[in-house]
Amino acid sequence: MVGVLRSIKGQSTVEAAFLIPVLLGGILLLVQPGIVLYDRMIMESAAASACRLMTTLPEGDPAGQCKTFVLRRLSAVPQQDCFHVHGGGCSWEIETQGGETSETVTVTIRNRVKPLPLLSWGSALMGAQNGDGTWTIEVSRTEKTQPDWALASADGGPSTWIGAFL
C-alpha cells in the first residue's frame, strides 16, 4: 500500500516536466503575432495621419515633408530585428501619391521584420520568407481630399467658396 502512494506523488512532477515546455512553446508562438499586430497598428496610424497631412500638401510632396512626418510616427516601433530590421540602413519604405489638388491621396508603408526562431524555421520550410530571412509587412491607406458633403454642396464645393472670399 505504501509503494502505491509514493508512485502517485511523483506523477505531478512528470506531468509538469512535459507540460512546461509545451506551455512555453505556446507562449512563444503567441509573441510573434503580437509583434506583427503592434507594427501594423503603428503603421496604420502613421498612414492615416499622413493621408490627412497630404490633403494640405502640393502634389507629390516635393519637400518630403510627409515622409519625414511618417518616419517620426514610425519611431514608436523599436529598432529590434523582430519589430523592424534596421541593420544596414532603415528598411521603412514610404510611398505617397496625390496631394491637395487630387481627389484622393494614398500612403503605403512597408516594413521588414525578422521572425522569432520557432516561427522562422517553420516559415522557412513553407517558403514564406524573403531571400534575407525576413517577412514584409505592408499597409496602404487611401483617403478623399474633400468629404462628400463638401463636394456635393449646393454652392459648388470648396473651389467656389474660395472665390467668394477673394
Image (spheres, rainbow, N blue to C red):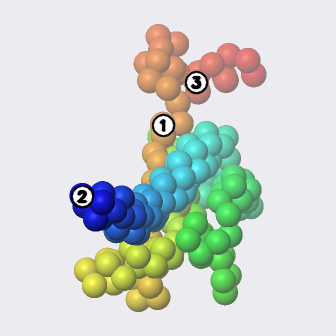
Whether residue 19 is visible: no
Secondary structure found at label 2: loop
Which kind of residue does numbered mark 2 sit on? Met
Q: Is residue 79 above or below residue 163?
A: below
User: What x and y, as percent, mark residue 93?
Assistant: 56, 69
Q: Is residue 129 above or below residue 76?
A: below
Name the residue located 65 percent from the left edge and 59 percent from the top edge. Answer: 77
Name the residue located 48 percent from the left edge and 55 percent from the top edge. Answer: 34
Which kind of residue does numbered mark 1 sit on? Lys
Q: Earlier in the sequence, mark 1 or mark 2?
A: 2
Whether residue 72 is visible: yes
Q: Earlier in the sequence, mark 3 or mark 1?
A: 1
Question: 111 or 59: which is nearer to us?
Answer: 111
Q: Are marks 1 and 2 in contact (CB under 8 Å)?
A: no
Q: Which mark is residue 144?
A: 1
Q: Which mark is residue 1?
A: 2
Q: Residue furthest top?
A: 154
- Tell which tag, 3 or 2, sits nearer the viewer: 2
